[in-house]
Amino acid sequence: MRPSRLDPLFAPLTSLKGVGPKFEGLYARVLGTEGPPRVIDLLLHLPHTIIDRRARPTLAEAVPGAIVTVEVLIEKHRPSPPGKARTPYRVLASDETGDITLVWFNAHRGRIEQMCPLGETRVVSGRIELFDGMRQMVHPDRVLTAEQAASMPMMEPVYPLTEGLASGHVRRAAEAALDRLPALAEWLDARLKDRHSWPAFAAALRTVHQPDRPEAFAPEGPAWTRLAYDELLANQLALGLVRANLKRPAGNRNVGDGSIRARVQAALPFALTGSQQRAIGEIASDMAAPTRMLRLLQGDVGSGKTVVALMAMAAAAEAGRQSALMAPTELLARQHARTLTPLAEAAGLKVAILTGREKGREREAVLAGLADGSIPIVVGTHALFQDGVAFKALGLAVIDEQHRFGVQQRLALAAKGDAVDLLVMTATPIPRTLVLTYFGDMESSQLTEKPAGRKPVDTRVIGMEKLGDVVEGIGRALSAGRQVYWVCPLVAEAEEPTEDTPDLASAEERFEMLRQRFGATVDLVHGQMKGADKDAAMARFQAGETRCLVATTVIEVGVDVPKASIMVIDHAEHFGLAQLHQLRGRIGRGSDASTCILLYRGPLGETAGRRLEIMRETEDGFRIAEEDLKLRGEGDLLGTKQSGMPGFRIARLEHHAPLLETARNDARMIVETDPHLAGPRGEALRDLLYLFGRNEAIRLVEAG
């Protein structure tokens, strides 16, 4: 139960004065909430900049380009002439040192006459510019009487907005939200707080929303940094509590005599790399320990994570336990099943698949096999979580592409068995900072080598003006029997190009173009197709019946066609680095030399140009991940959409990353000394977990 002291912060945002029901949807959009927004959601929505209105020069002293607040006499109105609505409305004004023109476009005459009465003085605030040598202010931010100006904030916060929501409305709502802040007990360690001179939580929020000087607002300043640490600590504490509460009872070992693993290894058509052997050993050691395994397996594209996972499943089978491998998409789940089945069957292990598509008798047979233990390995999607799925003895859960699954899903799958070991795989190599952020509850293994025989990919960056030459080259490759991916950013052409989709190539458009040129050898696959149609298109390509596959990023992860040796990425400047790296990893899997062509439309921006340059320089996914982090700054390496450090609203990587280690150590100490959050600081920390939406961890504490 959430403490009643927090109720004012969890009240609906519409309970604030001035935030009526008609604004609820707009606030939900800008605050990124799934349900109706609450007061706390607005309080944690910090301004992205501030306007400093403290400069009060005379007109003669005002610097062009600066935001100034000036007191002027209204001298003359020059309305737009009749029938010339595009001509601006001008108001001439002056002080004792000079004059200025106030300019409005599409103005309402009555409103401006009321705002700027002739012969009266007004305080005007906005950006001053020179036009034809004359001072002007276009659309002043404020036109106030002296009495009104006395209460105007000199430091004005500017919030991220959405269409239909004005900055002033959000600012007034935030002021009302600040009045709801209750007195809360301090949850920070007193020595840490004093060492950094951090204010209390409520004081920090007030400072950032209502700064009295620019330094008070700075992300590296004490107020913002304190809030960022609160957010990092809430995250690390939630991860630490998950880890502490998912311990396995002593004596429940998930590893056997090695006989099945030996048969799997004998069936492999290649030798294991050194890092694969090391990871297999680390996993077996975890599975043999009396506590539950929580391990992250990071491997670059094509580094052989699936084989490592199969060895872990074989170890579980030796101990009479079942394994489940969960993938984020049906396409990837079926790909894993195709890869695993021949190797597992060579060792005498049956592999089943369970997605939303299995129906009727087929589904019933799989469910019965899981319940009676005759199916030792199942591969599937979220369907594995559902209530109707029961295992006889689930011992190992393998989750692929972890960043698409949250902590709650980890718990749901783990709840399907008694003390289930958890292995998380990701093909996005993750910098250490983000490993701590997302996987602070896990040990980590890295696969740093590619399996023997994998050849480097020749990456070329080519301008769109040479599209004809690229198509000619593709024709020669197809004639030589090679297979080609052609990846596009869109499924269908946008009805009208927007700023985000300026004349981008669509998969359907490219498919038609290439089909006319090369005939039935060209096929199409994208995410809006029915599952069976997608699978059929992929099967035709894998069998070599088609040799050029036009696709969207639906093929980004897990698709394995060893004969495909050419990858064309259309409008590559619109893809992120991690995505480009994932796509390139679809080729270079066979014996042919492989080529990746990054087609771009110039002129390239600095960041897009650097991304393509890095792709040309290296195939090392760990280096690419670090570079991606540098380039994105506040962007989002693991695919969530919020700004700030990935998955966070307040913490900023470039300012607050060093605090992660402190937060992790602090959280570990809390979990060791007060695992049920029962002491005075523990009670306060429960408030922290609720405030930052990490309350799934509190349910664990109470269940424990």
Image (cartoon, helix red, strand yellow):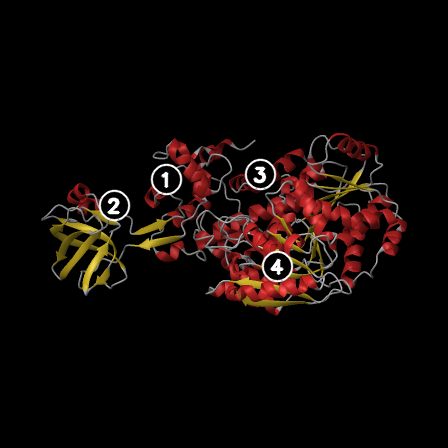
Q: What amino acid type is highlighted by mark number 4? A: Pro
* Cα separation between marks 3 and 1: 26 Å
Of tags 3 and 4, the one toward the viewer is 4
Q: Which mark is residue 695?
A: 3
Q: Which mark is residue 151?
A: 2
Question: Crowding at label 1, few (<14), some or many (≥20) Cα neighbours within 10 Å?
Answer: many
Task: Looking at the image, tell me whether mark 1 or mark 2 is earlier in sequence order.
Answer: 2
Q: What amino acid type is highlighted by mark number 3? A: Asn
Q: Position of residue 34 (x, y in %)?
A: 51, 37
Look at the numbered discs 4 and 1 and tell me whether their residues touch, using CB distance below 8 Å. Answer: no
Position of the N terminus by quadrant: top right
**Image-quadrant location for residue 462:** bottom right
Q: Position of residue 654 (x, y in %)?
A: 51, 59
Task: Looking at the image, tell me whether mark 3 or mark 2 is earlier in sequence order.
Answer: 2
Q: Position of residue 61 (x, y in %)?
A: 20, 64
Task: Looking at the image, tell me whether mark 4 or mark 2 is earlier in sequence order.
Answer: 2
* Cα separation between marks 1 and 2: 17 Å
SS assignment at label 1? helix
Query: Label 1: which residue?
Result: 173
**Residue 402 visible from this viewpoint:** yes
187 lies above or below 611: above
Query: Label 4: which residue?
Result: 431
Q: What amino acid type is highlighted by mark number 2? A: Ser
SS assignment at label 3? loop
* Cα separation between marks 4 and 1: 38 Å
Horizontal side of 4 relative to 368 (left or right) equals: left
**Image-quadrant location for residue 598:** bottom right
* Cα separation between marks 3 and 2: 40 Å
